[in-house]
Every structure is written in structure tokens, then in C-alpha cells.
Image (cartoon, grey):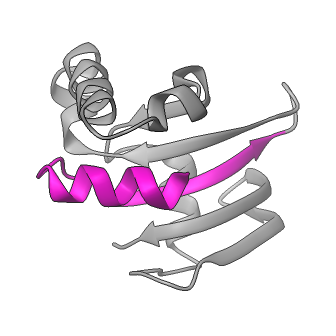
Amino acid sequence: MGEELVALLDAAGFPVTAAAWIHFPDVEEWRLVLRTPKAEKDLLGALREMSEIMDAKGDLRARLDLSRVKLVPPSDRMLQAIGRMVRVTGPPTVRFARNVVDGIYIDDAVIYRLAA
């Protein structure tokens, strides 16, 4: 579903510079984290735009609970830390688990896209 959403956003011209499923052990949940400059300017507007893109294309919104999708700005520390170790520009995905980078613990991540 993550790859499907990224492809939909790309096709709609919604900028995504990083995309990864990241496990947050404190809440025992996987979240799809998408880095976009739109989150810095107008987070609520970016979420609304993303949900409209999802609604326009099939049943993705019914299969992917929006509470599991997190839009973050380019300054997101976790993605910046992972980006110092890993670069991913497309298929295949990269698994990044049980690492500490710049004092940030990354329990587990499946990375679709992560560029500088």
C-alpha cells in the first residue's frame, strides 16, 4: 500500500522526497512516513490534498487508515538521520533495523524512497 500511495502522489504531482514504513516501538505501530515540503507550509492542507488524491483512485483510502500515514517536513530528524546512512531512489526497498544514528533509535524501517 505504501508503494501504491507513493505512485499515486507522484502521478498527481504531490512532492514526496522520502517514503518509508517505520516501526514506532513506543506505540507498537507501523506508520507510513512521507516527507514532503507541503507539510512544512500547510500540514492540514497537505493531508487534505493527499486524502483527495487517495479518494480519486480506487479503494486505497479504505485499505490504508490515514491515522497510520504521517506527513513530515524536510527537517524531520529521523528521516535525516536514516538518510545519512541509506539512499533509496526506487525499487527495490531497503530494510533498516535496530540502528542508532545521531542519537535517534530506528527500531525498524522499510524504505521506498530516501534521497538527500
Q: Position of residue 14 (x, y in %)?
A: 17, 47
Magenta region, residue range:
1-24
Q: Camera-side residue: 21 or 25?
A: 21
Q: Position of residue 84 (x, y in %)?
A: 52, 74
**Farthest residue in the bottom direction?**
92
In the rendered view, tell whether residue 19 sits above or below residue 72.
below
Q: Is residue 43 magenta?
A: no
In the rendered view, tell whether residue 115 sits above or below residue 17.
below
Residue 37's quadrant in the figure? Answer: top left
**Farthest residue in the left direction?**
13
Q: Residue at x 63, y 52 (%)?
A: 21
The reply to whether residue 32 is visible in this rendering is: yes
Asked whether, in this view, residue 96 is left or right of residue 42, the answer is right
Quarter of the image that includes the C terminus: bottom left
In the rendered view, tell whether residue 89 sits above or below residue 43.
below
Q: Camera-side residue: 104 or 66?
A: 66
In the rendered view, tell whether residue 92 sits above or below residue 67.
below
Asked whether, in this view, residue 53 is left or right of residue 28, the answer is left
Residue 25's quadrant in the figure? Answer: top right
Q: Residue at x 59, y 25 (%)?
A: 65
**Farthest residue in the front direction?**
58
Q: Position of residue 106 (x, y in %)?
A: 76, 55
The reply to whether residue 16 is visible in this rendering is: no
Q: Is residue 17 magenta?
A: yes
Q: Position of residue 26 (x, y in %)?
A: 86, 28
Asked whether, in this view, residue 84 is left or right of residue 25, the answer is left
Q: Residue at x 20, y 26 (%)?
A: 49
Asked whether, in this view, residue 74 is left or right of residue 110, the answer is left
Count of labels in the image: 0
